[in-house]
Image: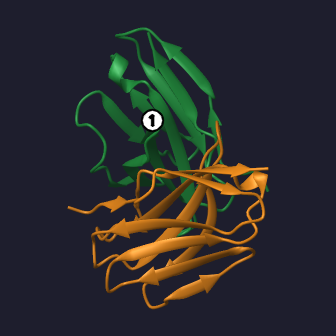
Chain colours: A orange, B green
Amino acid sequence: GESVGLHLPTLSVQEGDNSIINCAYSNSASDYFIWYKQESGKGPQFIIDIRSNMDKRQGQRVTVLLNKTVKHLSLQIAATQPGDSAVYFCAEKGDTGGFKTIFGAGTRLFVKA
Amino acid sequence: NAGVMQNPRHLVRRRGQEARLRCSPMKGHSHVYWYRQLPEEGLKFMVYLQKENIIDESGMPKERFSAEFPKEGPSILRIQQVVRGDSAAYFCASSRERSYEQYFGPGTRLTVT
């Protein structure tokens, strides 16, 4: 069935370094992918999205890369800051024709000052 | 413009009691989604509703769980005869019609004792 999973459950980086969080998905029919950030005790916060007709999309300090050949997503955070410490989820839009979102398990990012 | 509102933020119920979780979507949003999150896990889709209609309830247990989104008032997720396994954070998200982008509320943390 559909699934979205992450390679690394925990990532620790030095402040100022770049972070890369990876994600694999299994449904080749998915056409929309989202990265969310979730801080402790809060709901997920939208970071950036990408449609399946794109390979790359950039935001403010974040870049999402989509490799449809190997069904892989990554989130790159430039100049990581302590405020970036959170759990990051990749998610895909399901193919039921509705708009439910299927979430992966998450990667916890620690930023060391 | 207020974000998605959920109440209560914390709810404690004894086994066998009923839990009612409320979600008020963002202004102008007509679609509501409910997700459940266990500690250290991703969000699991439960149900997707439009005003007065359940569009997709494929993630919601058939027994004890129900959801509604009336013409007036908030969306309600109702759990009857709660058991310890229902303890989790329940998140609501809302979106505009035909939009993939969902905005999440702060969640309701349900504890069943």
Q: Considering only vertical position in the picture, is A104 above or below A42?
A: below
**Where residue A86 appears, x then y in whole percent?**
64, 49
In this rendering, position of residue A58 left or right of residue A74: right
Picture quarter containing residue A73? bottom left
Residue occupying image coordinates x 65% and y 45%: A39
Q: Secondary structure at mark 1?
A: strand
Pick the quarter of the image with the C terminus of chain B: top left
Can residue B65 be spotted in the picture? yes
**Where residue B46 appears, x then y in whole percent?**
37, 46
Residue at the farthest left position: A1
Residue occupying image coordinates x 27% and y 72%: A27
Pick the quarter of the image with the N terminus of chain B: bottom right
Please state the chain letter of the residue tagged with numbered disc 1 in the rendered image.
B
Residue occupying image coordinates x 55% and y 65%: A35
The foreground one among B104 and A61 is A61
The foreground one among B34 and B86 is B86
**Where residue A53 appears, x then y in whole percent?**
44, 91
Q: Amino acid at mark 1?
A: Leu
In this rendering, position of residue B109 left or right of residue A52: right
In this rendering, position of residue B102 left or right of residue B13: right
Q: Considering only vertical position in the picture, is B90 above or below A17?
A: above
Q: Considering only vertical position in the picture, is B58 above or below A70?
A: above
Q: Residues within 10 Å of mark 1 (few under 14, many from 20)?
A: many
In the rendered image, which residue does mark 1 sit on? B77
Can residue A98 be spotted in the picture? no
The foreground one among A62 and B28 is A62
**Where residue A29 appears, x then y in whole percent?**
29, 79
In this rendering, position of residue B15 left or right of residue A110: left
How many dots with numbers? 1
